[in-house]
Image (cartoon, rainbow, N blue to C red):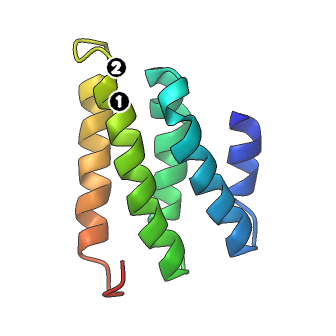
Amino acid sequence: MVPLISQLHLESSYLRRQIALLAISSVAPLVTIETIRDFFIPILRSLAQDKVGNIRMNTAKSLSAVSKAVTALDENMVGNADVHRAITSLLGSLTKDRDPDV
């Protein structure tokens, strides 16, 4: 699933990038912290800078879903705090987006 999500987020079609975000939101509770840190966060970082406002807005929604999944994991797990910092940073940048809908 992760390779497909990685491929979809690079597609020129915004709908396929949207599918990547929906997939991340759906599978985040099922994957390891390493998968979130090593694969999902870089994808979300990329999509947070997408040219399409709806993709940036839905990236924020996906970040929220990923944050909940990370919180559900053991708080003492190695990498958990790093992932939360990355999510907080990305959400912070999205709150300053030039598009008021984001």
Point 48% across, 30% down: residue: 29
Secondary structure category for the residue under label 1:
helix
| Near-viewer residue (85 or 19) | 19
Q: Is residue 49 visible?
A: no
Residue position for label 1: 70
Figure check: 29 above or below 47: above
The image shows residue 50 at horizontal and vertical percentages of 53, 72
Q: Quadrant of residue 30?
A: top right
Q: Quadrant of residue 9?
A: bottom right
Q: Inspect the image, locate mark 2, and give the three-letter code of the amino acid beneath it.
A: Leu
Point 44% across, 64% down: residue: 48
Where, quadrant-wise, is the N terminus in this rendering? top right
| Near-viewer residue (19 or 77) | 19
Compute the Cα span from label 1 to label 2.
5 Å
Point 41% across, 41% down: residue: 66
The image shows residue 54 at horizontal and vertical percentages of 51, 77
Residue position for label 2: 73
Q: Inspect the image, locate mark 1, and give the three-letter code of the amino acid beneath it.
A: Val
- Tag 1–tag 2 contact (CB < 8 Å): yes
The image shows residue 79 at horizontal and vertical percentages of 33, 21
As drawn, the label of residue 21 is none
